[in-house]
Image (cartoon, rainbow, N blue to C red):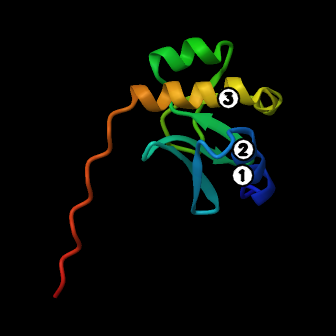
Amino acid sequence: MATQHRTIDFLLEQTAGAVSARPMFGEYGVYLDGKMVALVCDDQLYVKPTATGRTQAEPAPEAPPYPGAKPHLLIETDRWEDADWLTRLLSITASELPTPKPRKPKRTR
């Protein structure tokens, strides 16, 4: 089951535009400061695990967002209601993740 667009709209509203979301194979990647900090799969939020993020999100179970993926912090939907907490969690996660490497330019033939 793919994520519904209203789920992403709610997430963006709760974070007051601090994050952006990009569609990915029927699901969504959540970005902050150019870093992918979370995935939304099947209308559930999976935040990339970091040391401080785990502490902030406690108690949050870890689960893979899709088969074969590494476990992420599964944030229950009722916790999305606390906009300040959610934005803080995503900001903490972004601050601990490495800056993505720049993409190589596409070769032309």
Q: Say what amino acid the circle numbered 3 marks.
A: Leu
Which residue is painted at 72% across and 49% down in the image?
A: 42
Q: Say what amino acid the circle numbered 1 marks.
A: Ile
Secondary element at image label 2? helix
- Position above or below: 79 against 54: below
**Residues at marks 3 and 2, CA–CA distance in whole angstroms:** 9 Å
Q: Give the percent coordinates (x, y) of residue 92.
A: 51, 24
Which residue is painted at 73% across and 55% down in the image?
A: 3
Residue 86 marker: 3
Q: Which residue lies under the disc numbered 2?
A: 11
- Position above or below: 66 against 81: below
Look at the numbered discs 3 and 1 and tell me whether their residues touch, using CB distance below 8 Å: no
Q: Say what amino acid the circle numbered 2 marks.
A: Leu
- Position above or below: 11 against 48: below
Tell me which corner region of the image, top left, top right, bottom left or bottom right, holds residue 89.
Answer: top right
Q: Give the percent coordinates (x, y) of residue 5.
A: 76, 59
Q: Nearer the N terminus, badge 3 or badge 1?
A: 1
Looking at the picture, tell me which residue is in the foreground, 84 or 7.
Answer: 84
Q: Is residue 43 left or right of residue 19?
A: right
Q: Is residue 69 left or right of residue 10?
A: left
**Residues at marks 3 and 1, CA–CA distance in whole angstroms:** 14 Å
Residue 8 marker: 1
Q: The N terminus lies in which quarter of the figure? A: bottom right
Look at the numbered discs 1 and 2 and tell me whether their residues touch, using CB distance below 8 Å: yes
